[in-house]
Image (spheres, rainbow, N blue to C red):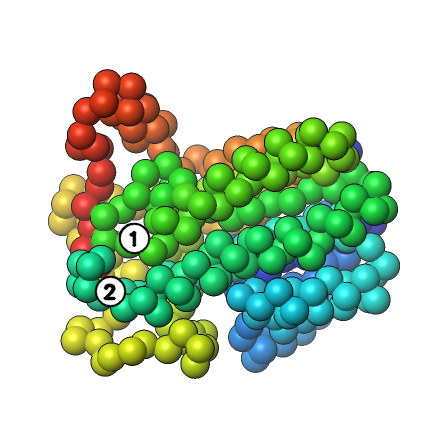
Amino acid sequence: MKSLNGKVAVVTGGGGGLGRAMGERFAAEGMKVVLADVQAELLDTTVSECRARGLEVSGCVTDVTKQESVDALRDFTLSTYGSVNVVCNNAGIGAGAEGRMWEHELNDWKWAIAVNMMGVIHGINSFVPVMLEHGEESHVVNTSSGNGGVSPLSGTPQYAATKAAVVTVSECLYAQLQEVGARIGVSVLFPGPNILRTGLFESWRSRTAEFAKERPRKTPYTTVEQLEAQMKAAGREIAYTPVEEVAGVVVDGILADTFWMMPASERGDETMRLRYESMRSRSNPSYLRQVPG
């Protein structure tokens, strides 16, 4: 895309954190923005604050685990602004499973798959046909993570597996749109460790009854502060990139038609090399990072 001014953007998971930052940056670029989130109160507050700053932002309560809900988001966007040019499938959760993966509840897996993977697929199903029909320059951004998209952290199998799936889905979407000559770009976004400070560790607050825990937790949910302390004790400081800077990476990537969107804090080059070398040499994956579940 050569310009964002006057175009329409949709961002799921837009009530706070990175989603909100992307929406605000899009609006600052002159776009009309629809923020979608499952948390109605959070979304209302965000939209009100954006409008108070003169940004053209609307909100639509959306449950990305349901195709019909994402279809309603599409219909709301079209009825409000008449078109859609940028879709950021950004909504994501940390399942908060407890223990080793063979001890995890099936609902932990089902919830992570429903939000992190199916949420992206639902967004593609709803919006790509609209983009193909109007034929204008458009772009799809799918949020993944270095945790899974580059290499998995051992303590977060649901999150890592679904974020790895987002990369593959994005690659397939890119290839198929190229095959039909569509004017639709595709990117996969790796936000870097800053995603830890966007409410990911409080995902349990938005967990619906359909995916409710099947048994009481034995331990409290891990907080981002606890994870930071654990990482520091292991000699690994976490370098954060502000979400506003990541939103800038997204804007620059859309304008440059960049598939791999990685801010400076997503330092996965060495891990990618080690993973490739392990595959090439058929050696065991000694590069895997260990963190508590």
Q: Position of residue 193 (x, y in %)?
A: 37, 47
Question: From where the camera sits, is residue 290 visible?
Answer: yes
Q: Residue at x 69, y 29 (%)?
A: 179
Q: Quadrant of residue 147?
A: top left
Tell me if label 2 and label 1 are in contact, CB under 8 Å.
Answer: yes
Identify the secondary structure beneath mark 2: loop
Q: Which mark is residue 157?
A: 1
Q: Position of residue 201 (x, y in %)?
A: 35, 64
Q: Which mark is residue 104?
A: 2
**270 relative to 74, above or below:** above
Q: Amino acid at mark 2?
A: His
Left or right of 262: which side holds 70?
right
Identify the secondary structure beneath mark 1: helix
**248 relative to 70, above or below:** above
Q: Earlier in the sequence, mark 2 or mark 1?
A: 2
Q: Residue at x 29, y 53 (%)?
A: 157
